[in-house]
Image (spheres, rainbow, N blue to C red):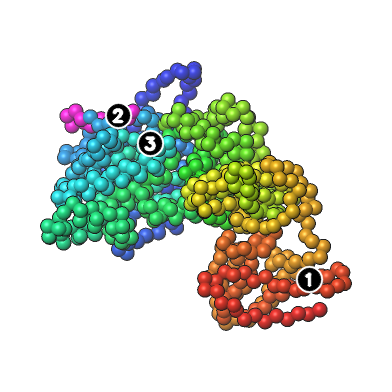
Amino acid sequence: MEIEKSLYPDERSELELSYSGAIDPQICYLDISPERYDEQEQDELFACYGKKFVFTGKAFTLLTPEALWYPVSKPVTELMNPYVNTSEYTDYTLTVVPAQGNTVVSQGELTVSGDTSYFTNNRKLQGITLISGQFYRDSFRLAGNPLLFEFYGTKKSMLGSAWGDYLQALEWSLKRTSTVLQWMSPGGKYPFDKLAFVEVPVSFYAFERSWKEKNDYVHPEMQLYREWRGVVPSEFRRRMKKVKTKEEKSEEWFQKYILSEEYMSRVQKHDVPELSVKEILFNSKQERDRMWSEKLFSAWPDNKYSIRPLLMTCGTLITSDEVPVIHRMITIMQRQAEEREMALSDKLSYHWEGVKFLMHHSLWDALHMDSASFCMESVIYLKALQLQRYILTQVAWTDFSAFMDHFLKEHPFQEVSLDYFLDVFQARFNWDLREYIPQWLHERGVPKLLVRNFHMRRIQTENSEKRFVHFKVWNPTGVDAIVSLEAWESARKKIIDQHYLIEAGCAKEVNYYLMQPSSDFLRVRLNTNLSQNLPGEYENAMESCNLSRWDEGCFDCDTSLFCPSENEIIVDDEDEGFKVIKGKSFFFTRKWEGYQRHLLSPTSWSPVFNYDINSYGEFVRGFHCKGAGGKQADVEWNARIPRSGTYEMYIYVGMFLNDWVQPLHRYTFLL
């Protein structure tokens, strides 16, 4: 409905709506395809419980924002383009008269007067959830910690009976949970006053969508777990039933065998119906795998109860009509802040579909093309990374990170426009990003870079020993590129974080001096970021070369330095002179299109790459490989020799098997 009323700045107006009727569950998940909507899914016990999105009975009521059970000014999903942000912050108060004997759960502070429950929120939220049922309630607050843990279930004394006489085990688990919550929250502070675990029917279902950070099992201040999935691991209960001797009841034994990290890690690996509190909140293995793979907006891990996606998206909401995915990008940049200290492996290859799309299209195209949905997550990630690295070419990471932390703390649970954010950024760094935003938004094409002489040397001075890092890079394309020089003194201690803008058609020579590290471990990496280079990283190269200068800085250099030697003729597997001569096969072979991450013994000649293998190549450092047996085929190199003379012939064979055995090759040379 449209309301024709104008408001002056800071003017408030009240509108009272009276409405009635039943909740139609078909309003939920309109963006899900009919095939996926109707598909029956099995749990770990191979049982199908159906899919119910709302419950409206007197015995039990469950309404999430997806059901549109209260008036909103924006739809839950923009059907034409789900990636367009439709969130907003609102002041919510809720008054509920539940069925007799029911307990009501929702966000905010609860007060009860007679048969009426009132919920008042002291912060704005993007939506609220209502649950009403015949629950038993347990609560727990750690000493010196204001965070309140609440447990709502259908079993009496759910916590006490489960943990028995060992309530210290519950306290220990909640302490770890509280610590993890602080670590996962932006700014290192959990933004809410409580966390409620609420048992819901096993038939309740929430779809996971790539365009949305969280699912409906997780909401502000609450997490929903399906019945029969208790908050205490069954392995713990079985173990405690076997405790009989005095020795086993001692504090030392309890700490060693029950509360130890080793034991808890074993419990987490068991496929049991119950989940511990810590597992509900944060499955460390699955989260670690997701961070390594960097599939930020693909399907979430198997732990659908993880609260982390919620914590990463609550707080400040940056909005823009022109760039409707800007808040998602800011979230990625914030998550990058967590991983800055980590020496992660190559990420670009996981988003290669996005790279191929951006070779011919822009971010603006992706936001307005239905055909871009298959790679939208990758496009968003790559363009967010590009914007972040562009900022870091002129702003130190520590300064930018401090600015972002301060900005988010200054605007908690608020909506701010991208223009306002850019104004604050300009006031802090005296740099107007608006000059770059149109290029970043509309630019088509992805650069590819030639890298030479990336190496590190030890240099002894009068007082200390330094490390000298050098590389040359040429951008022969018509699109600007950014390269990043990074180094770690340990797996989590970053000591170099430099970023260089390589403009279209330019070549640069970079010299960087590094003080002697405090440990023997030193990992140096050159990252080509958003580029057509595959893999996108060069690590710890130790080439020897003649240097024209030893002073520190980034300098122009001659592009002739990147030309191949006149006395060498190289045929790479990317060149026209290389081809696979197909043979007949009685075996099924999978067709691979383009380079894939390292495969184990493909049945036919396949183009693959692996960042751990020093493969040859200018832009794509890949190779063709084939396992024994399978499809019989030969590979062929053809080289045109322009000048007469005597030539030595070599064939480069990469060492990529775990147990290296020199294979038997047959070579035929034809002149």
Question: What residue is shown with label 3?
Answer: 189
Residue 514 is situated, as x and y percent measured from the top left of the image, at 60, 45
Badge 2 is on which residue?
120
Residue 119: in magenta span: yes
Quadrant the N terminus occupies: top left
Amino acid type for the residue under numbered disc 2: Thr
Query: Label 1's element?
Result: loop
Crowding at label 1, few (<14), some or many (≥20) Cα neighbours within 10 Å?
few
Classify the position of the C terminus by image quarter: bottom right
Question: Residue 521: x and y, percent?
Answer: 52, 53
Magenta region = 112-122
Along the viewing direction, whichever of 42 and 563 lies nearer the viewer = 563
- First in residue order: circle 3 vs circle 1: 3
The disc label shown at residue 639, or none: 1
Residue 223 falls left or right of residue 138: right
Report helix, strand or loop for mark 3.
loop
Callout 3 amino acid: Lys
The span from disc 3 to disc 2 (Cα, nearest Å) is: 22 Å
Residue drawn at 67 percent across, 49 percent down: 470
Q: CA distance from mark 3 to mark 1?
A: 63 Å
Element type at marker 2? strand
